[in-house]
C-alpha cells in the first residue's frame, strides 16, 4: 500500500545521485552494489521470498522513475529473477507453464536489447518466423513449448550478437538492468526529447525496483494505461487502454490492439471501479491530470506508476480552467499549467470542413490540429526532406522511440496500429504534433514506401496528404485551412466551446498579473488593427522598408541611382506623400497607443535587382549581339557601385541616414505631417521615432538633431506642436556596451535581438541556419537555436548590461524588445526578469506573449510539466 | 621679467575655465568682463598707461596660451588699443607715423578676419592693389599715407562685409579678441589637428594678454622664431628665422622671406647673444627642445612665448639621447620623448640616390622622408584624390591653416615660399609629412593648377613628382626607394649615424623596462626570420589560409567541390605534405620561440573564383552559342552552392572545422608531423594551435578533442610526444562575454581585434571604410578609425571582460593580441594597462611595438608633447 492507500507492489528506489555519478564519471558509484543488496534484502524480507529463488522466485521489474520522461523513452526490464531453474519454479507455483515461459522470454528479450545491446529486430524476426510456422495471428496463440523454444532462440541470438551469455544470476540481472536504465538517460532519443522540452541534461534518473505483478496470467489478468481525464480534450472521466493477458509494455508498443478502458467495466467491474476511485485520489493528490500504469493479476488491481500526464493544448486549457473552478488550484496555478506554445497551437488554422472531400482513411484522433505534407515512410527520410524545407507526414505501421527524430521533423504522424496511449499518440501530444493513430483501414508497407487504403488506392512516398488530428481523418491532397475556434475567439470574442472559454480565462488572468506590456510589430494598418484586436498595447516596431517596395520601387530606384542632389530630392519628394499616408493609416489604427516607427534600416541595394542575375542577363544579351535596356545598364552600374561584401555589416541603419542627404528628413517629415493630420482630425497620435543600428552616442546625437529640427519645422509650418519621443534600437554589441552614454540621447531603447544575436555570435541568420545549425544542435553547441530562444549567457548579458547602465544614466528610460524573441515564451520570461517594460512581437504572437508575460510573474511555480 | 629672469612684457592670462564654459554653453561666463577689467587695471597700473589712451596708448596682444597647439593654428590679435585717435598719439610718442599706421592697419586686418569674420583674401587684395600702384615689392616700401589709406580701405571692407564698424573702443576690442581666441579652439583646422594628435576636444585654451612690444619700429627692430636645437635633425645650437622691421605674424605667414637666425649675430650681436643665453635657460628649465617667439624693439630683446617645440622623428630620437647623455633627463624620460610613430617614420624607405635624375627644384629640407605622388594645387583637390586612394603631393606658394585638410591627405608638401619655421614646415614636421619649402626656383600658379621650374618645365596638376624632404630636392616622376638607415640598423645592426644610435638606445631601454612581449604575425619562414631580426619573441599569428593559395589553389578547389568523402580525403591528403613543409620552415625560423598557428579561418568560397564574373563569363559563352568549360560549370555550381550573403558572418573559422570532415585533422597532423621532424632534427619547435572564431565553449571543446586525438595519433606513430598548447581567438563579442567558460578549454586567448571590432560595431572593414568612415571622422563619431586605434569604450571593454573572467576561471591563462592593433602605439598602451602578456603585429611593426610597450610602462609621464 502506498501512502495514499493505493495498492502498490512493494519495492525500492535507487537514487538519482547514483545515476548522476555514473553518467559523469562513467564508473559505478562505490556504494551502489551494497545499496542495492541492502534494499533487496529488505524487499526479500517483506515478500518472504528470495530474488530468483528456484522453487518460488521473487521477480522484480526495473524502470525509470524520471519525472521528466514519457512512456517508452527510458528503458524498462520486467520479470527479473527468472533463469533456467526459476522458470520451472514459477511454472509450478503459478500453475501455468505457458505463463512462466512467456515471462522468461519477455525477460530474455528485454534484457537482450536493453542491457546487452542486441538489435530488437532480430528478436522480432524470430517471433514472426515462429508465429508463421504456428499460423498464429498473435503471441497468445503460442504455447509453453513455443515460448521455451523462443527463450532458447533468444539466448542463442544474444550469445552470437553480444559475445556472452544471458546471465543466469538474478543478482547480476538486477544490477545490470539498473545500470542500463541509468545509461538510457543519455540515449539519443532521450537527449532529443529533453532538448525539445528544455529539460537539463544533467538531472539524471532514479530507478524504481518493484515486485512483479503479472498481467499475463490469463484472461482474468491484464495491463493498462489510464488517464484521469481525456488528455486530448480535457474532459473529465477515466480514459485509456486495456489489454487482457498482457504485460505493460504490450500496451505502449501496440503489439496487440488494446481495448478502450471503458471495456474493463464489463470485463472486471470491481477492478474498474477501484481504478476509478484510485484515479480520483491521485488527481486530488497531484491536483492535475495523471497518467497511470496498472496491472490486474487474477482479478486483483495493482497500481504500478503514475505521473502528471501529457496532454494536448486544448486539454491543458480545459483542465486548468476546471481545476480552478473546482477549487483544486489557484488562478495563478491554472495559469502556470498552460503555455504560450499551447495557445499558439490552438491558434493554428483547421481544415475547412466545406472543402474536405472523401476521406482516405479514419483513425484515432490522437493529437488535434491540421497538417498537410508529403507522406514519408521512415524517420530518416522525414528528417532529410524536412531539412530542405519540405513539409512531411510520417506514416508508420507503429512508431518506436527510434522514430523520434522523424516525428520532430514531421508536421503530422499517421500510424496503422495503436490507440490513444500508443507511443505515437503520447509523443505527438507531448510535442503538439498532429497525430492520427490506429488507422485500421490502411495497410502500411514501409519497405515498399507506400500505404494502401481499403478501396485499393495506393499512396506512394511523396504524395501530399492532409491529416486532421482533431477528427481522426486523413485526406488525399492539400485541404484548405480556416481559422480555428481559438483564433475566432481572439479575433471576435466568439466563445465556440469550453476550451475557448478556458483560453479566455487564462488570458484574462495573465493580463491581470503581468508587468510586461505587449506590443506588436506591424507595418500596415491592417496588421495594426488585428494586433489591437489581439490585445496589443501599441506598435513596438513599424519597419518602414516594407513601404519602399511594391509599386514604389521605381521611386526608390530613382532615389538610389540619382547622381545629383536635385534628382535625389525629387525622388524623395515623390515618396513623401506616400509615406505620410502610410503613417496616417497606422496612427489611426493605433489611435491613443504608442506607434514606434523605425527609420529606414536595410542597405539600399536591397531595393535594387540581384547583381549576378542582372549581370548575366545583360551579358547574355550583349554576347548574342543585342542591345540591353539602358535602364538595366544604369541599374547594374548602381548595383555594382553599391555592392557590399557583407551587406549586413555595411551602409545601413543610422549610417544610411547620416550619409544619404534628405532621407531622414523625408521620413521624419512624413511622420510629423501624419501626426498633424491625425491631431487635426481629433485623434490622439502617439508616434515614436526609432533610429536603427546605432553603435555610438554621436550617431544618435546627429540623427536626433535632424529629427528635432524637422519636427520643429513642421510644427512651425502647421501650428501644431509635434512631440515624438526619439529612441534607438540596441542591436549592436557596442550599443549595449556603451548604453550608459547612448541613453543620454535616447528616450527609449528597443532591443533588436535578431541583429544583436547575429553580431554577438558573428553569424548571419541567412547564411548559417542551413549551413551548420543542425550540426550544432546535434553536437550540443546550442540547446536551441539562438534565433528562436534568446541566448541568455551571451546576448542576454548584453541586454542586462544595457538595461542596467541605460537606466542608471537615464532614469525612466523606456525599454522593450522588438526582435522575434519578443514572441518566444522562454525569452519573454528572461525579459520579464531583466525588467524590460514591454515586448513586441508579430500580431499573431500577441496573445502568446500576453499569456507568457503573465506566467513569467509566477516565479517558483514549476510549469514545465505541462509544457 | 619672468620667473626665470627672462625679459617678458608684462601681461595677464584669462583662464581655460572661462573658455570651457564659453564653448560648452555658448554664452560668456558671468564674471568674465569683471575679470578682464580687474586684470587690465593691474596691467595699466604696472605700465603706467591706460589701454588705448589717446596721447600715449597702452597696446596689447591677445593670443592663445594653449599648450596643445602649433603656430598659426589658434588666432592672435596684435596692437589692440589702437583707434582713430590713439594712432595719432602712438605716432607722436614713437616719433614714427609710418610705424603707428602700420600697427593700426595690422590691428584692423587681424581684428577684421579674426573677430569679425571677413574673408582675409579681401584685405590681401587691397594690399596687392596698393603695392602695384606704388610699384612696391613689399610692404616696407609703403609710407604712412599708404598705410593710412589701407586702414580706411580695410575699415570700409569690414563695414560692407560684416555689416558693422570696426570698434573704436579699446575695451571692446580686447573683450572681443579674447572671445575670438576662445572660439578658434573649435575652428575646423584646430579640430582636425587635435583629432590627428589625439588631443581631447574639451580642454579649451587659456588666453595670454601682453603689453605690445614692437618689431616694426624700424631696422633696429624685428621679430623672430627660434628653436633651441635644430628641429629637423636635433643638432644642438640656436636655430630659426628672423625678420627685421616686422611683427611676429609676418615670420610665420611668410609674407616676406625671413633670414636665417644666424644673420642676427651680425645685425644685432648683443640681442643674439642674449637670445642664445635665454634659449639655454629655457632648455634647461623645460629639459627639452623649446621653440621661442621673440621681438627686438629698437635693440631690446623681448621674449614673447615659448613652448616645447615640434620636431621630426630624427630630431626626437637624437635630442632624447643627448639630453639623457647630458644628464638633463633620465633614460625613462628619454624613452617617453620618442614614439613608435616616429620610429615607423624613420623606417620608411628613402630614395635610391643612384636612381635620382636631374632635380626639378631645390628648397628647404623642412621635414625629412621620401614621398611620391601626383602634384595637386589646393587642399580640396588633395582630399578628393586621396579619398580615391591616389597619392598626392600638395604644392602651394605658401600654406595657411586652411590647407590643413590637404596636408593631412597628402604624402608631401612643397611650397615656393617660407623657411623652416613657416607654417608648412612646422605643420608637416608635426605630422611627420615630408616637406620641402621655400623652393624659390619654382613658380607656383595655383589658379592655373601648375608650377614652372627655372628651366621652363611646366608641371601640370596630376603629374607625378618625388619629394625628398631630407635633402630638400624635388624630382620629376617616381624615384625608386631603398631602405632607410634606421631600417638597415634594425635589419643588420649597422650604425650609420647618431640618429640610428639614438634609436638603438631607446629600443634597448624599452626592452629593459617593458612587460609586454612582442611577437609577429608571419606566415612564411622569410617573414618569420625578418621578424626575429627585428626582435620578435615568437609568432603570435600564422594564418594558414595564405598557404591555400597560389599553385595549391587547384587542390583546394578539389577539396571544396568534392562530392564524396573519398574525393575530399584525397584532396586533403595531397595538401598534407605541403602544409607540413610550411610548418617545418616556420618552426625552423622561430626555433625555440612560440609559433601560434591558426587553423583555417576564411569561408571556403574565398578559394573559388568570384561569382558574378564567372557567371557572366559562362552566360556570355552560352549566349554566343558556345560550350563553356565543364570545369568552369562545375566551379560555378560550387560557387553558387557555397554563396553566402554575408561571408564574414558565415561558415568559417571553427564552424568550418566542425562541418568539413577531415580539415582540422589534416592541419593538425601537418603541424604535429612538422614538430616531430624538427624535434628529430635537434630543434626546439614550440607550436601552439589556435582555433578561430569560437563563440561558445562547446565549439572549442569539440575542436580541442579532435586536436588531442590527432596529436596522440602522431605521437603514437612516431614515438615522439607532441605537446602543443591549444587556445582560441577571442574575436566575437560572445566569446568575450563567455570567456570564463571558454577559458576552461583554452590554454591561451589571442584577441583578434580586427574581427572583434567588426562584430562589436557591426560593420565590415571592406564595406564601410570607403562608404562612410571619412564622413564619420568629419562628424566626430570617431576620433580615429576603430580599425587603427582600438575603441576602448566598446571593443576594449570586451577585451577587459575577457581577460578578467578568463584569468579568474583559468589562472595562468596566456593572453595576447594578434589584430592589427597589436602594432598601434595607443592601442599597445591599452593592452599593457589591461594586463595582456603579449602583442603580435606585422614584422615591420615589431620595433615600434617594442618601443611602445616600453613607453607604456612609463605611466604618469606625459609623452604627448613629443608626438
Image (cartoon, coloured by chain):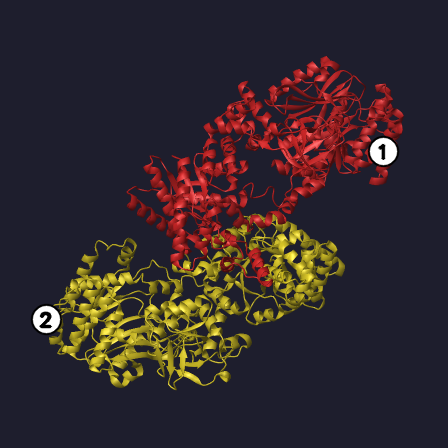
Chain colours: A red, B yellow
**Residue count near mark 2 (Cα–Cα under 10 Å), binned few <14, some 14–19, many ≥20:** some
Give residue B664's quadrant in the image. bottom right
Residue at the image point whose x is 69% and y is 43% from the top: A384
Examine the rendering and report whether any part of residue B199 can be seen. Answer: yes
- The answer to whether residue A185 of the structure is visible from this angle is no
In the shown orientation, is residue B254 left or right of residue A254?
left
The chain holding disc 2 is: B
Rendering coords of residue B74 (x, y %): 30, 66
- A570 in relation to A319, above or below: below
Q: Are marks 1 and 2 in contact (CB under 8 Å)?
A: no
Residue A126: numbered disc: 1
Q: Nearer the viewer, residue A490 or A146?
A: A490
Q: Quadrant of the N terminus of chain A?
A: top right
- The residue located at (53%, 19%) in the rendering is A325
Q: Secondary structure at mark 2?
A: loop
Residue A494 tag number: none
Q: Dot 1: within a 10 Å radius of its alpha carbon, few (fewer than 14), some, or many (20 or more) residues?
A: some
Q: Which residue, given by chain and number where applicable, does mark 2 sit on?
A: B55
State whether residue B2 is above or below residue A513: below
Marks 1/2: CA distance?
131 Å
Which is nearer the eye, A807 or A26?
A807
Residue with the most extreme front position:
A626
Judging depth in this view, the residue of A661 and B698 nearest the camera is A661
- x, y (%) of residue B110? 23, 69
Q: Secondary structure at mark 1?
A: helix
In the rendered image of this protein, does residue A320 appear above or below residue B809? Answer: above
Amino acid at each position: 500500500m502506498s501512502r495514499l492507500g493505493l495498492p502498490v507492489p512493494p519495492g525500492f528506489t535507487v537514487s538519482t545521485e547514483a545515476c548522476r555519478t555514473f553518467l559523469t564519471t562513467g564508473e559505478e558509484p562505490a556504494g551502489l552494489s551494497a545499496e542495492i543488496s541492502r534494499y533487496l534484502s529488505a524487499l526479500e524480507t517483506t515478500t518472504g521470498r528470495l530474488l530468483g529463488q528456484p522453487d518460488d522466485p521473487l521477480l522484480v521489474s526495473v524502470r525509470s522513475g524520471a519525472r521528466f520522461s514519457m512512456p517508452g523513452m527510458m528503458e524498462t526490464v520486467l520479470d527479473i529473477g527468472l533463469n533456467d531453474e526459476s522458470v520451472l519454479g514459477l511454472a509450478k507455483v503459478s500453475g501455468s507453464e505457458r505463463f512462466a515461459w512467456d515471462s522468461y522470454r519477455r525477460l530474455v528479450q528485454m534484457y537482450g536489447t536493453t542491457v546487452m545491446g542486441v538489435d530488437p529486430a532480430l528478436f522480432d524476426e524470430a517471433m514472426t518466423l515462429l508465429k508463421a510456422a504456428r499460423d498464429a495471428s498473435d503471441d497468445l496463440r503460442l504455447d509453453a513449448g513455443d515460448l521455451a523454444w523462443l527463450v532458447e532462440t533468444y539466448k542463442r541470438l544474444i550469445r552470437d550478437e553480444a559475445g556472452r551469455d544471458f546471465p543466469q544470476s538474478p543478482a547480476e540481472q538486477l544490477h545490470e538492468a539498473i545500470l542500463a536504465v541509468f545509461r538510457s538517460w543519455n540515449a539519443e532519443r532521450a537527449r532529443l526529447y529533453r532538448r525539445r522540452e528544455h529539460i537539463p541534461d544533467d538531472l539524471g534518473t532514479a530507478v524504481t525496483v518493484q515486485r512483479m505483478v503479472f498481467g499475463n496470467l490469463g484472461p482474468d489478468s491484464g495491463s493498462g494505461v489510464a488517464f484521469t481525464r481525456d488528455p486530448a480534450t480535457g474532459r473529465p472521466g477515466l480514459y485509456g487502454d486495456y489489454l487482457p493477458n498482457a504485460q505493460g509494455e504490450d500496451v505502449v508498443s501496440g503489439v496487440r490492439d488494446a481495448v478502450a478502458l471503458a471495456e474493463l467495466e464489463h470485463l472486471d467491474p470491481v477492478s474498474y471501479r477501484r481504478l476509478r476511485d484510485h484515479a480520483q485520489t491521485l488527481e486530488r493528490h497531484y491536483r492535475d491530470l495523471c497518467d497511470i500504469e496498472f496491472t490486474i493479476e487474477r482479478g486483483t488491481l495493482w497500481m504500478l506508476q503514475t505521473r502528471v500526464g501529457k496532454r494536448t493544448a486544448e486539454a491543458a486549457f480545459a483542465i486548468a480552467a476546471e481545476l480552478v473552478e473546482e477549487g483544486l488550484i489557484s488562478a495563478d496555478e491554472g495559469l502556470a499549467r498552460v503555455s504560450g506554445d499551447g495557445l499558439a497551437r490552438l491558434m493554428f488554422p483547421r481544415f475547412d470542413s466545406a472543402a474536405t472531400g472523401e476521406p482516405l482513411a479514419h483513425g484515432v484522433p490522437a493529437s488535434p490540429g491540421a497538417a498537410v505534407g508529403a507522406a514519408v515512410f521512415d524517420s530518416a527520410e522525414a528528417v532529410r526532406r524536412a531539412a530542405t524545407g519540405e513539409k512531411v507526414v510520417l506514416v508508420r505501421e507503429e512508431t518506436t522511440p527510434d522514430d523520434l527524430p522523424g516525428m520532430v521533423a514531421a508536421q503530422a504522424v499517421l500510424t496503422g496500429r495503436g490507440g490513444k496511449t500508443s507511443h505515437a499518440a503520447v509523443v505527438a501530444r507531448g510535442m503538439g504534433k498532429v497525430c492520427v493513430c490506429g488507422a485500421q483501414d490502411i495497410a502500411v508497407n514501409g519497405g515498399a514506401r507506400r500505404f494502401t487504403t481499403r478501396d485499393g488506392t495506393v499512396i506512394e512516398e511523396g504524395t501530399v496528404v492532409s491529416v486532421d488530428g482533431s477528427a481522426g481523418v486523413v485526406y488525399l491532397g492539400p485541404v484548405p485551412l480556416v481559422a480555428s475556434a481559438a483564433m475566432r475567439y481572439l479575433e471576435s470574442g466568439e466563445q465556440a466551446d469550453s476550451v475557448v472559454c478556458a483560453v479566455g480565462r487564462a488570458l484574462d488572468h495573465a493580463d491581470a498579473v503581468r508587468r510586461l506590456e505587449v506590443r506588436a510589430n506591424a507595418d500596415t494598418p491592417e496588421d495594426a488593427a488585428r494586433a489591437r484586436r489581439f490585445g496589443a498595447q501599441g506598435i513596438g516596431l513599424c519597419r518602414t522598408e516594407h513601404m519602399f517596395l511594391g509599386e514604389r520601387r521605381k521611386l526608390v530606384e530613382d532615389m538610389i541611382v540619382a547622381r545629383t542632389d536635385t534628382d535625389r530630392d525629387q525622388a524623395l519628394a515623390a515618396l513623401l506623400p506616400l509615406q505620410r499616408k502610410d503613417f496616417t493609416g497606422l496612427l489611426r489604427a493605433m489611435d491613443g497607443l504608442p506607434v514606434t516607427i523605425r527609420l529606414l534600416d536595410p542597405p539600399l541595394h536591397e531595393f535594387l535587382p540581384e547583381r549576378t542575375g542582372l549581370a548575366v542577363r545583360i551579358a547574355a544579351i550583349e554576347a548574342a549581339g543585342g542591345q540591353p535596356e539602358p535602364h538595366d545598364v544604369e541599374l547594374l552600374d548602381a548595383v555594382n557601385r553599391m555592392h557590399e561584401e557583407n551587406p549586413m555589416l555595411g551602409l545601413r541603419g543610422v549610417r544610411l541616414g547620416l550619409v544619404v542627404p534628405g532621407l531622414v528628413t523625408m521620413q521624419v517629415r512624413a511622420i510629423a505631417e501624419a501626426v498633424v493630420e491625425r491631431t487635426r482630425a481629433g485623434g490622439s497620435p502617439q508616434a515614436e521615432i526609432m533610429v536603427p543600428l546605432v553603435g555610438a552616442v554621436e550617431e544618435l546625437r546627429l540623427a536626433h538633431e535632424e529629427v528635432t529640427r524637422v519636427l520643429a519645422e513642421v510644427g512651425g509650418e502647421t501650428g501644431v506642436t509635434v512631440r515624438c519621443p526619439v529612441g534607438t534600437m540596441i542591436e549592436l554589441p557596442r550599443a549595449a556596451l556603451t548604453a550608459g552614454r547612448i541613453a543620454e540621447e535616447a528616450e527609449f531603447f528597443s532591443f533588436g535581438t535578431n541583429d544583436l544575436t547575429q553580431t554577438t555570435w558573428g553569424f548571419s541568420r541567412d547564411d548559417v541556419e542551413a549551413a551548420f545549425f543542425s550540426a550544432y544542435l546535434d553536437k550540443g553547441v546550442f540547446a536551441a537555436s539562438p534565433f528562436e530562444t534568446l541566448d541568455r549567457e551571451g546576448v542576454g548579458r548584453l541586454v542586462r548590461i544595457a538595461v542596467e547602465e541605460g537606466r542608471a544614466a537615464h532614469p525612466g528610460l523606456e525599454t522593450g524588445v522588438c526582435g522575434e524573441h519578443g514572441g518566444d515564451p522562454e525569452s519573454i520570461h528572461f525579459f520579464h526578469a531583466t525588467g524590460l517594460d514591454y515586448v513586441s512581437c508579430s500580431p499573431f504572437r500577441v496573445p502568446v506573449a500576453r499569456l507568457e508575460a503573465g506566467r513569467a510573474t509566477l516565479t517558483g511555480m514549476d510549469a514545465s510539466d505541462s509544457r
